[in-house]
Image (cartoon, rainbow, N blue to C red):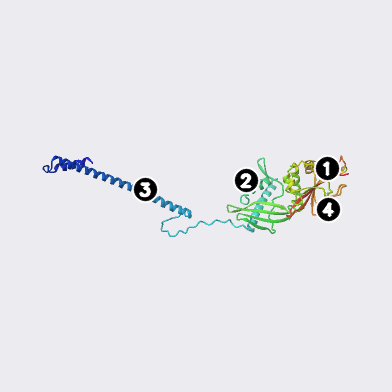
Amino acid sequence: MTNSNQKGMEQKLRDLPSFQLNKSSQEQIHNHLMKTVIQYEQKERKASMIKKLFAGFAGVVAFSLVVFFTFTIIDGDFLNGNIGKNHGTNQGPNTTQDPPIKKPTEFNAEKAKELMGQYKLSFSSLVKEAEENNGKMISFTTKAEIQRSFTRILTDEFSVSIVDSYFTEKDGNVFIIAKDGPAWLTDEDFTVTKIDDDHYVVTQEQDSLTLGHVLLTYHFRNIDDNWLISNVEKTNLDEKVIIRENAESIMESFEKLDMVKLSDYVHSEKGLLFSPYVFINQESLVFQKSEIRELLNDKKKRLWGYYDGSGFPIELTASEYFNNFLPVEKFIKDGLVLVDDLKERGNIKNNIKDFFPQSKTVEYFLEGSQENDGMDWQSIIFVFEKDQNGLWKLVAIVNDGWSI
């Protein structure tokens, strides 16, 4: 009880007529009233605390409801893809749609002609400038500058390869490299093929003195909504060129002792026959494509044939046979290459065409030395036949040389 309340109550008690109550009664009444007042104030304080607790609880509940409904709306928007749209406004139904995916500019035959024409014109102007200045470029001082001049026509990667192929830097200047120029699209018919929305190819078959019989494939790609030339591929269709290129790769495989690469050229059905002389017989060793890969690791001695003159057996490991009969280094350096032009030079009958009637050959021929009156001539002959896919594959490696 507060002091003010207590003093007020005591004053009221003193004002009562004293003659009506004795002192003992007055004290009882006083004590009873004081007790009542104290109980009343305690109830008031308790009620006030309950109100405060209730108000606090109500605030917490209200805040929780606000948070709940807020996140419910946000989650719903997120799941329905409506984040960023207005809600609870008077704007009516929301008809906003995602912007349509922008498709690349259409590519067609006319676009291919336009780009190839620009490419040819730009390159030809560089050639003309170089020719007028003894091979030196005047408008450009670095290859990087030339590369940037092609950026509206060629992709970055392709422009780098073209500039590296046709230009060189020397003493702070740029010079053109004297060689045949790129393969251009001609006025003859060509085919446009879509690879995907951003990639088209144009193919054209050409047969000329400079290129030979080839299939040209021009690649066009869309970069930032601009069509650019990204690559040009040349595939030889001349069978003699094809088998000669195959023979060169095979010689390189022997030089590096790369049997995995060699196996790529082996006929998958007929395998690869080895004959130490140009007369092939039924006993000649044949290895399948899968066996070629591990041939040099095989230490087994095999009968490859018989030495001319002595008739002694040629019993060697594959590695020993290669060292004795296929010393390709000197053929690569000094050999004369003859494509499908077999000749009989020695005393041994050449029956390659009898054994492989549908074949074509590439011969590496070394003339004999003057010291030996030319009798130490040698040759290695690669024999090719088409496989089931129409590709020229290696079916035999045959040796030839002077014989008794």
Q: Amino acid at mark 3?
A: Val
Label 1 secondary element: strand
Q: Amino acid at mark 4?
A: Asp
- Which residue in the structure is indicated by mark 3? 60
Label 3 secondary element: helix
- Which residue in the structure is indicated by mark 1? 314
Query: Which quadrant is home to the N terminus?
Result: top left
Q: Which mark is residue 354?
A: 4
Kindly indicate whether the residue at mark 2 contacts the one at mark 3 (C-beta within 8 angstroms): no
Tell me the mark number nearer the camera, choosing from 4 and 1: 1
Label 2 secondary element: helix
* Earlier residue among tags 4 and 1: 1
Kindly indicate whether the residue at mark 4 contacts the one at mark 3 (C-beta within 8 angstroms): no
- Which residue in the structure is indicated by mark 2? 145
Could you give the CA–CA distance between mark 3 and mark 1, rounded to whole angstroms?
Answer: 102 Å
Nearest the viewer among 79 and 124 is: 79
Q: Amino acid at mark 1?
A: Ile
Residue 274, given in percent of the width and then of the height, sits at 80, 47
* Earlier residue among tags 2 and 4: 2
Tell me the mark number nearer the camera, choosing from 3 and 4: 3
Residue 234, given in percent of the width and then of the height, sits at 70, 52
Q: Is residue 226 left or right of residue 247?
A: left
* Earlier residue among tags 3 and 4: 3
Q: Quadrant of residue 206?
A: bottom right
Kindly indicate whether the residue at mark 1 contacts the one at mark 4 (C-beta within 8 angstroms): no
The outermost residue toward the left is: 19
Query: Which quadrant is home to the C terminus?
Result: top right
Q: Quadrant of residue 17?
A: top left
> What residue sits 30% from the left and 45% below the top?
49
